[in-house]
Amino acid sequence: MKVRRTSSNLKISIDGIPLKQVSEFKYLGSIFTEDGRLNREIETRVQKANSVSYHLAPLLKHPNIPIETKAKLINSIFIPHLDISVPDMDPDQKSRTQKTTCEIRCLRRAVNKTRRDMIREMMGTTPVLHYIQRQRIRWFGHLIRMAPHQLDSKAYNKKISGYKARGGPRKAWVEGVKDTLKTHNISPIQAVHLARDRKLFLPSTPKMVQENG
């Protein structure tokens, strides 16, 4: 598979046997596509989360199970299925909307309400977008503490040069990190120092989580 904006053919053979070229493949539970986007991965995640929500439905709808218990089920089982397993990717607006819609659908089963603000207030669960932000900052901390020779650190610190394709550049992962830090009034320099001291983290419950991330 060749990752680039436009598809092209590759001719690679081993012992005279040509290898099949694919447009996507799964590795370590994540789906990688030739255009480098996350559309297929997010679709798969949403489908898995919907399946989990469906199997949890008898418990979420049960009137004798406390809301606190339902919230723990959602936080520990449902929400992690909506988080992509590639921690260095930044979700776009469309994917954030897909995940929020899936999240609210699950919460409605638990409280039998329709208003989004009322649902979250009653359940007390971690909003999926805040969960993703916490995972992003946690991974940023890992990167900062990594030794320079480690592969992930090399990829993060590498400066890319060469020809730039036409069109606007895609949003880099580090820009998503900066947006999250800005929301919590943390400068990038402060974040680096806090990460090195293992003190960089976001609160479990956000003061305010906006739907646009």
Image (cartoon, rainbow, N blue to C red):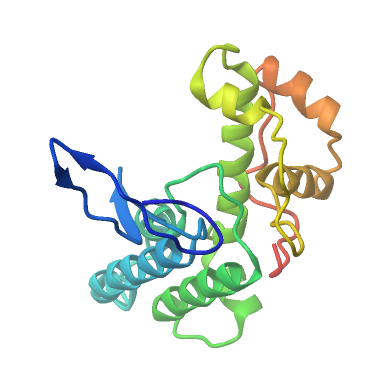
Q: Position of residue 84 (x, y in %)?
A: 45, 53
Question: In this rendering, does residue 127 appear at all?
Answer: no
Of the pair 180 and 69, the residue shown nearer to us: 180
> In the rendered image, which quarter is residue 166 located in?
bottom right
Question: In this rendering, does residue 26 appear at all?
Answer: yes
Residue at 46%, 74% (x, y): give it.
102
Residue at 61%, 79% (x, y): give it.
116
Residue at 51%, 69% (x, y): give it.
99
> In the rendered image, which quarter is residue 44 located in?
bottom left
Quarter of the picture containing the C terminus is: bottom right
Residue 89 to residue 98: above or below: above
Residue at 38%, 65% (x, y): give it.
66
Of the pair 50 and 30, the residue shown nearer to us: 30
Position of residue 58 in the picture relative to residue 166 (left or right):
left
Q: Position of residue 67 (x, y in %)?
A: 43, 66
> In the rendered image, which quarter is residue 54 located in?
bottom left
Of the pair 48 and 174, the residue shown nearer to us: 174
Q: Position of residue 105 (x, y in %)?
A: 45, 79
Position of residue 173 in the picture relative to residue 88 (left or right):
right
Residue 101 to residue 140: above or below: below
Position of residue 122 in the picture relative to residue 64 (left or right):
right
Position of residue 67 in the picture relative to residue 209 (left or right):
left
The number of callouts visible is 0
Q: Residue furthest bottom?
A: 114
Q: Position of residue 132 (x, y in %)?
A: 57, 51
Residue 182 to residue 75: above or below: above
